[in-house]
Image (cartoon, grey):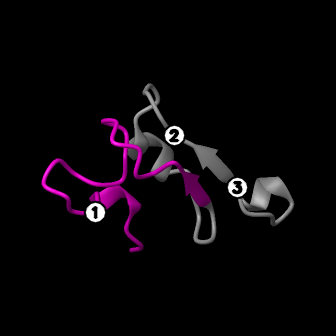
Amino acid sequence: MQRENGGLPLMVHIGNNPPNLDEIADLLSAGDIITHCYNGKPNRILTASGELRASVTAP
């Protein structure tokens, strides 16, 4: 997405879905920012067991 944004990082606010965080993460690049990622809602970066979602880890 940064390419389309003039090389600037993209900041994404998450909370209640839709869209699902896994769908959003596919569009992000290294350096982009996910805000409110520890919000306790289902659309957070941690799984129910407290592990980092695979969709938000760097390849």
Residue for point 80% across, 64% down: 8
Residue 2, image x, y percentages? 73, 61
Residue 5 image point, x, y percent: 81, 54
Viewer-nearest residue: 34 or 9: 34
- What residue is rendered at 45% in x and 51% in y? 37
First in residue order: circle 2 vs circle 1: 2
- Horizontal side of residue 46 vs 6, given as left or right: left
Residue 41 lies in magenta, yes or no?
yes
Circles 2, 1 touching at the beta carbon (< 8 Å): no
**Residue projecting furthest to the right:** 6
Q: Quadrant of residue 51?
A: bottom left
The residue beneath circle 3 is 10
- Kind of residue at badge 1: Leu
Relative image position of residue 13 (x, y in whole percent)? 59, 42
Magenta region: 33-59
Give the numbered dot on residue 52.
1
On the rendered structure, is 27 left or right of 19?
right
41 above or below 12? above
Whichever of labels 1 and 3 marks the residue nearer the N terminus, that label is: 3
Discs 2/3, front = 2
Secondary structure state at the residue bearing disc 2: loop
Give how far apart the Cα atoms at labels 2 and 3 are.
13 Å
Percent across and percent down for residue 49 are 13, 54
Position of residue 30 relative to residue 17, above or below, is below
Q: How crowded is mark 3: few (under 14 residues within 10 Å), some or many (20 or more)?
A: some
Q: Which amino acid does label 2 sit on?
A: Ile
Pick the residue in front: 39 or 4. Answer: 39
Q: Distance between the residues labelled 2 and 1?
A: 15 Å
